[in-house]
Amino acid sequence: ARSAIREYIYLSYCCGLSPEVTTNTKSFASRKAQIQVSALPKTYRDAVIITRALEKRWLFIDALCILQDADNSSEWERESCKMSHIFKHAYITICTSAGNDKNSGCFPGVAHLRGESLTLDMLSPGQGVWRVTLSENSSRLFGTLFGPLSKRRWCLQERILSTRLLHCGYERLVFKCN
């Protein structure tokens, strides 16, 4: 289905130590029917808002999109071989570069990200500089693109293979186009 290429957004995030919200064989049917956004960790909820702001319908979160059964690793083994394709063909990869777990949100320090208070404006076409306007201001700056996220196993592959990366920090977005 060629039309589906680049119609989804991929979320790159640190899981952290708290229990993961996942899809497994027991939750698969209910996940296919509906996922309550309000029940998701803050990083996932923020990614949904960003996905909607970018006017895309699909968001790929590996913990939700790949069966995570501990007693059946064959699904993960089969699907993990396809991840390079997932990264390469995503419309954009959202990188929660400043967050240290799935509860940090895409913009740590911002308590509540709301769609109506998030605007994405390309400031310098071709130079990858975006402005993000949030409902709450923070004096902290986005220090580095290589924060906690860079310690994740897939990080290098995500950064090399993704055609577009949106690094989320405290008050800033950094857009990279490979």
Image (cartoon, helix red, strand yellow):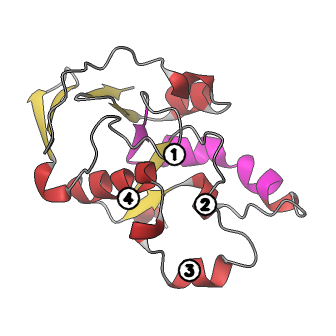
Marks 3 and 1, how far apart at CA: 21 Å
Q: Please give the residue where the numbered disc 1 appears in the rendered image.
A: 102
Give the label on residue 21, or none. Answer: 2
Mark 2 vs mark 4, foreground winner is 2
Name the residue tied to disc 3: 32
Quarter in which the C terminus is drawn = top left
Gap between marks 1 and 4 measured at Cα: 23 Å
Residue 59: say if magenta: no
Residue 34 image position (x, y, % from top left) = 48, 81
Secondary element type, mark 3: helix
* Residue of label 4: 7
Residues under numbered marks 2 and 4 in contact, where contact means CB atoms less than 8 Å apart:
no
Q: Is residue 13 above or below residue 115?
A: above
Quadrant position of residue 92: top left
Depth check, front residue: 178 or 32:
32
Give the number of callouts.
4
Residue 41, x across and y down, in percent = 48, 55
Look at the picture and state if 165 lies above or below 114. above
